[in-house]
Image (cartoon, grey):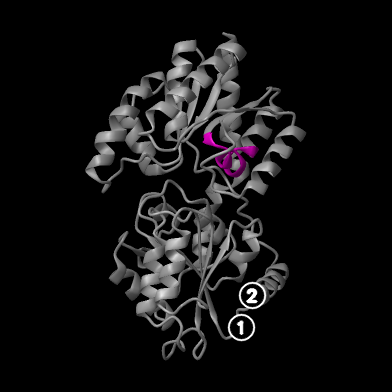
Amino acid sequence: MLASVASMIGQFNLENIRSLHELGYEVDVACNFVRGNTCVDGDIECLKSNLRKMGVSRYQIDFDRNPFHLGKNLLAYRQVRNLFREKNYCFVHCHSPIGGMIARIAGHKERIPVIYTAHGFHFYKGAPLRNWLMFYPVEKCLAHWTDVLITVTEEDYRFARRHLRAGRVVHTYGIGIDTHPTDSRKSAEAKKKIRAELGIRPCETMILSVGELNDNKNFGMVIDVLHEMKIGTAAADGGLKSGGRWIYVVCGIGKNEAKYRRMADRYGLKDCVKFLGFRNDLKDIYAAADLFILPSKREGLSVALMEAIAAGTPVICSDIRGSRELVRDERCRFPAGDRKALRMLLQEWMEGRLIPDADANRKNLEKYDMCRVQKIMKTIYEQMGKSEIL
């Protein structure tokens, strides 16, 4: 199991490792445990401990997430190829653009079959031209060295079937999550506890975003819009919680945190925008929120959006690949990067003119359930093992 960073193993692949173990495979993990992760150091140590308990050997590969750092990634390629040569794996399951590129080249050189999960191609309808020029030719070429190409969105699946000549193309409906509704009594208790911890009063409205604090997730646009809408003052007349303030809660870490904090300070919103960092109690935080916003410019299939939906939280999101598959109601989507459209949507929600159908979203989410996804993954792993034996 190979990825550029350890956080991708911890967040997306532990169930895959368990499935491989259930099928009788011995599993190694190769990734960068040191740099580039989207979680805190303590969670990386926890991941290492969990892998050790699962009997998984781990290997440090010095991947760099920047594709232009050629020297560092050339070193990573050598490390990966040496590992493949030494271990002679039955097959490799790789993730992320850099990890997937290096693993497929090394796998081809060492004659090791490769599964690649594309968690959202960087080229897509509406993507910048530079994305098409940079990433599409690479994927086009590497598809020939990909035994199984897994896509997590319907749009990517259709594109891959038409344009990428991988051995097989499979659609898995994401990485799978627990889609079962949470106990309403426990959710109410968790909501009360979290809001008390954050100092959010019952008359105040909690708006939530979750993800890495980078340009793509675009949380700065939400801060801008809420400033324009006077987030720190009493709610608009007829608002969901008239008379209370609007509190924007952001969970995650990333390079833009200092920038977003400065924005909040400059707008006089220091007490109204709360940065919680990386959290392990997100289910409770989703339950505490009145509204979840995902303003991303690009997504594959957002786990945060799926988890918010599973928690029964009303959601609005940018109208992009993946997100529109999860939120079918066009009224709850806005053009990516369109600040005016987001403001109008929020105003409609605050005034009660827009009521996101949380039940319909959760019904649509059932096909993304962990059990269903793992059945698909086990079939892929079994077939890979049989082909290797043959």
| Quarter of the rendering occupied by the C terminus | top right
Looking at the image, can residue 180 be seen? yes
Q: Residue furthest top?
A: 390
Camera-nearest residue between 297 and 172: 297
x%, y% of residue 289? 56, 71
Q: Nearer the viewer, residue 127 or 224?
A: 224
Mark carried by residue 368: none
Task: Check if residue 5 falls in the magenta segment.
Answer: yes
The residues colored magenta run: 4-14
Q: Amino acid at mark 2?
A: Arg
Residue type (three-letter) at the residue carrying disc 1: Arg
The residue to which callout 2 is attached is 195
Q: Residue at x 64, y 38 (%)?
A: 14
- Badge 2 vs badge 1, beta-carbon distance below 8 Å: yes
Spatial CA distance of label 2 from label 1 is 7 Å
Residue to which mark 1 is pinned:
201
The residue carrying pointer 1 sits among few (fewer than 14), some (14 to 19) or many (20 or more) residues within 10 Å by Cα, namely some
Measured as percent of width and height from the top left, residue 89 is found at: 59, 16
